[in-house]
Image (cartoon, rainbow, N blue to C red):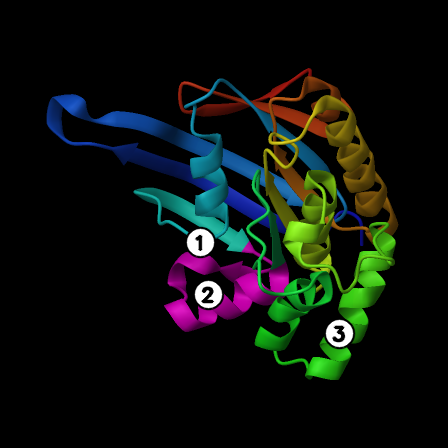
Amino acid sequence: MKDELILSAHGLRKSFGQGAALIKVLDGVDLEVRKGERVAVVGLSGSGKSTLLHLLAGLDAPDAGTVDVGGEDILSLDENALCRLRNKTLGFVYQFHYLMSEFTATENVAMPLMIGGCTRKAASRIADEMLAQVGLKDRLAHKPGQLSGGERQRVAIARALANKPLCVLADEPTGNLDEETAEEVNQLLLRLSQDLHMSFIIVTHNHGLASRMDRTLTLHKGKLSESSA
């Protein structure tokens, strides 16, 4: 169902430092994302956008608040259960691709599938299908050093989507690319989000990309609010 709630966070607070140096990065953030919804989060550098993604993914713990992903209260999970949830339920795309240089495109995409329990043969088949979807069917056996920057980021996107996650968390996914390549990758993300009916939360400085999301939220002084891109 399209109205199905995929991810929710309520009252998130996070500070860094101590005493007079204490900085409130998130000060009571609420967020709800529904199935297939595409949400952009914008804000100034240092406003806490990446911190927010880390809390939503369970990569860091809030000082206060709750995070629910796919019906699971992630703050109540032990580390093993949290790792399983991230593997099955969330996809991650970063500004830098973080591909393993010694492995081919297929092997890089297949890795999280095998970690999740797929056989090597099944994982490779799914990886090749996903790489074809991102326009890399002729680059399956290439290693990252043999690929362009845009191609490497496409592999990273294929890896994030391979497990068919409920939600993809993307942190400046085109921030390290030239303008033309960035637009190609943006178009790819938009197409995949529609074709695969996955939810996306994209942190971006690119207001052109933000304007094409279903909603744009601005993070300012620790608060998250609805905005126009």
Instruction: Identify residue for label 3.
Output: 124
Residue 143 appears left or right of 57: right
Exactly how many numbered labels are in the figure? 3
Regarding residue 78, the answer to whether it shows in the image is no
Question: What's the mark number on residue 196?
Answer: none
> Label 2 is placed on what type of residue?
Leu
Which is nearer the eye, 46 or 124? 124
Q: Which numbered mark, 3 or 2, is in the foreground of this view?
A: 3
Q: Nearer the viewer, residue 180 or 16?
A: 180
Which residue in the protein does label 1 denote?
58
Q: Label 1: how many residues lie within 10 Å, few (<14), some (14-19) or many (20+)? A: many
Q: Earlier in the sequence, mark 1 or mark 3?
A: 1
- The type of residue carrying mark 1 is Gly
Q: Please report contact status of discs 1 and 2: CB closer than 8 Å, yes or no.
A: yes
Residues drawn in magenta: 69-89
User: Which one is nearer the viewer's eye here, 167 or 141?
Assistant: 141
Q: Nearer the viewer, residue 58 or 101?
A: 101
**Which quarter of the picture shows residue 129?**
bottom right
